[in-house]
Image: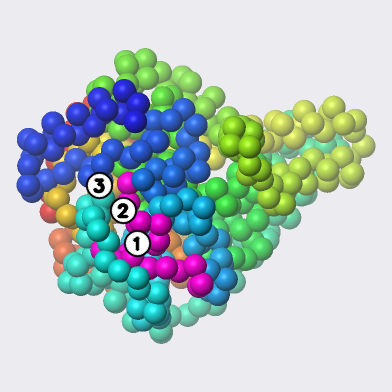
């Protein structure tokens, strides 16, 4: 652990002592190992979990250990989901409690589990969140399970159609941009690329399917995102375990810790933020390249060639030189990345009213209540599947049940709101513009807030 993280650990302990017993300031007991390594890679994140989770080389769910190795190939969601959470050559596995709960709404997985039981875990869970049968999350899950039996699933085909249409739009605008040698048309293509990627995010949460590959068209990787977004950000939003938080440090420091950021970091993002957004896509690819080199192990897969299909298409169908095609393509990637940062980082979490690590909340809080407290949803997209799919809309329900297609979420809304009402928990939302401003106020924030049950 680095000196910096020890200082932070002292910070956490000090504030925990003030609130001893009943309240916590982060969802884990231990400061995450490797969190402050300069390389914010999914490999380091998983390695850290193996040190901290007490899974003893197996898969941990609650306080029990399971050996799911023989189940990997027959896992209905695809083998990657289990493979990424435990690597045989590393002695520790990880705690998959939150992933198991949110990814299995039906009872089948729970019923199969005893077949793979090995023994109870030696140490208590590192994550403080809980799943009590009568708590908010399990109650809501039971009701959602029942409702799923009677909903109309045909809207799911519109999600597929939207991704397909966006892919066509990417090709058409790229063709026009290169043939007219126009950066304005290239910007139009960038908007379509960004919309395609965000819409494809709906599909990377689901069992393996070809549309998740559309997520890779501009250097992002659905494989990496299944760790950094699905099992890091979704399960532990705004916490020390959230890679959406750690990946942007030290440039964008969302946690309200005075020791983490200088005045320049707190307010400078108004100016340098757009440059960071523009670099997101290319940086992801370079990070994988560097990580492969450092570890001496190839981190690339065949689907990592997908980003190069667009420039090949542009060269093959245009009447321009390689240099012109590369200029236009690079412009498309940078602009799509800028749009992605603008839309994604103000979609629902980085708001002063949203709970972040360092804020105070009840010890052993229900997983669902914690999730609710970390979200302030963006207004103005509800009612339109196209808008929801391309802006990370319907953020509450998507976070709580990520495998469900966005197209069917509106049919679950009444059950969700009813349960929220019963547990006295409300939804917060604000406009596009105020979300953008709020993101910057969150970057400037250094005062802790209290979130009560
Ligand atoms: Zn998601």
Query: Residue tagged by mark 2?
Result: 54
Question: How many numbered callouts?
Answer: 3
Answer with the quarter of the image where residue 201 lies: bottom right
Q: Indicate the position of residue 379 as horizontal and vertical percent values.
A: 38, 49
Magenta region, residue range: 52-71
Q: Residue at x 26, y 70 (%)?
A: 138
Query: Residue tagged by mark 3?
Result: 27
Name the N-terminal-most of marks 3 and 2: 3
Q: Indicate the position of residue 374 as horizontal and vertical percent values.
A: 29, 47
Q: Are marks 2 and 1 in contact (CB under 8 Å)?
A: yes
Q: Nearer the viewer, residue 172 or 299?
A: 299
Q: Are marks 3 and 1 in contact (CB under 8 Å)?
A: no
Callout 3 crowding tier (Cα within 10 Å): few <14, some 14–19, many ≥20: many
Position above or below: 124 against 208: above
Callout 2 crowding tier (Cα within 10 Å): few <14, some 14–19, many ≥20: many
Name the N-terminal-most of marks 2 and 1: 2
Q: Residue at x 64, y 33 (%)?
A: 293
Answer with the quarter of the image where residue 453 lies: bottom left
Q: In this rendering, would 86 be left or right of 126? A: right
Mark linked to residue 149: none
Query: Residue tagged by mark 1?
Result: 60
Callout 1 crowding tier (Cα within 10 Å): few <14, some 14–19, many ≥20: many
Whether the residue under disc 3 has CB within 8 Å of ligand 1? no
Position above or below: 12 against 107: above
């Amino acid at each position: 652990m680095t000196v910096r993280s020890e200082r932070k650990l002292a910070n956490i302990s000090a504030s925990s002592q003030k609130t001893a017993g009943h309240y916590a300031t982060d969802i884990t007991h231990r400061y995450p190992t490797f969190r402050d390594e300069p390389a914010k890679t999914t490999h380091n994140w998983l390695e850290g979990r193996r040190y901290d989770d007490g899974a003893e080389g197996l898969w941990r769910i609650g306080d029990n250990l399971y050996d799911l190795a023989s189940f990997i190939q027959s896992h209905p969601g695809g083998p990657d989901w289990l493979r990424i959470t435990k690597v045989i050559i590393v002695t520790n596995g990880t705690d998959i409690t939150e992933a198991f709960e949110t990814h299995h709404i039906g009872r089948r997985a729970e019923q199969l589990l005893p077949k793979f039981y090995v023994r109870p875990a030696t140490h208590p869970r590192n994550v403080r969140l809980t799943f009590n049968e009568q708590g908010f999350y399990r109650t809501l899950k039971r009701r959602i399970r029942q409702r799923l039996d009677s909903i109309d699933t045909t809207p799911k085909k519109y999600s597929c159609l939207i991704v397909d249409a966006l892919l066509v739009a990417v090709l058409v605008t790229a063709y026009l941009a290169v043939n007219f040698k126009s950066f304005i048309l290239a910007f139009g293509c960038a908007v379509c690329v960004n919309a395609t990627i965000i819409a494809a995010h709906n599909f990377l949460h689901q069992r393996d399917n070809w549309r998740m590959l559309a997520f890779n068209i501009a250097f992002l990787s659905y494989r990496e995102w299944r760790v950094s977004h699905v099992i890091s950000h979704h399960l532990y939003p705004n916490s020390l375990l959230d890679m959406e938080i750690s990946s942007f440090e030290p440039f964008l420091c969302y946690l309200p810790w005075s020791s983490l950021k200088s005045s320049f970091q707190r307010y400078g993002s108004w100016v340098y933020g757009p440059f960071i957004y523009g670099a997101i896509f290319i940086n992801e690819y370079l990070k994988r390249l560097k990580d492969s080199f450092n570890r001496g192990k190839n981190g690339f897969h065949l689907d990592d060639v997908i980003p190069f299909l667009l420039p090949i298409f542009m060269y093959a169908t245009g009447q321009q030189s390689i240099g012109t095609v590369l200029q236009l393509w690079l412009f498309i990637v940078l602009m799509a990345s800028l749009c992605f940062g603008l839309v994604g980082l103000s979609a629902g979490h980085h708001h002063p009213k949203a709970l972040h690590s360092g804020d105070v909340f009840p010890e052993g809080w229900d997983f669902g209540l914690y999730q609710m407290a970390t979200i302030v949803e963006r207004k103005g997209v509800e009612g339109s599947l196209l808008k929801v799919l391309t802006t990370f809309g319907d953020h509450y329900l998507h976070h709580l049940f990520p495998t469900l297609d966005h197209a069917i979420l509106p049919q679950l809304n009444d059950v969700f709101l009813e349960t929220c009402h019963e547990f006295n928990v409300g939804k917060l939302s604000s406009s596009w513009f105020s979300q953008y401003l709020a993101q910057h106020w969150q970057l400037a924030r250094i005062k802790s807030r209290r979130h009560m049950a």
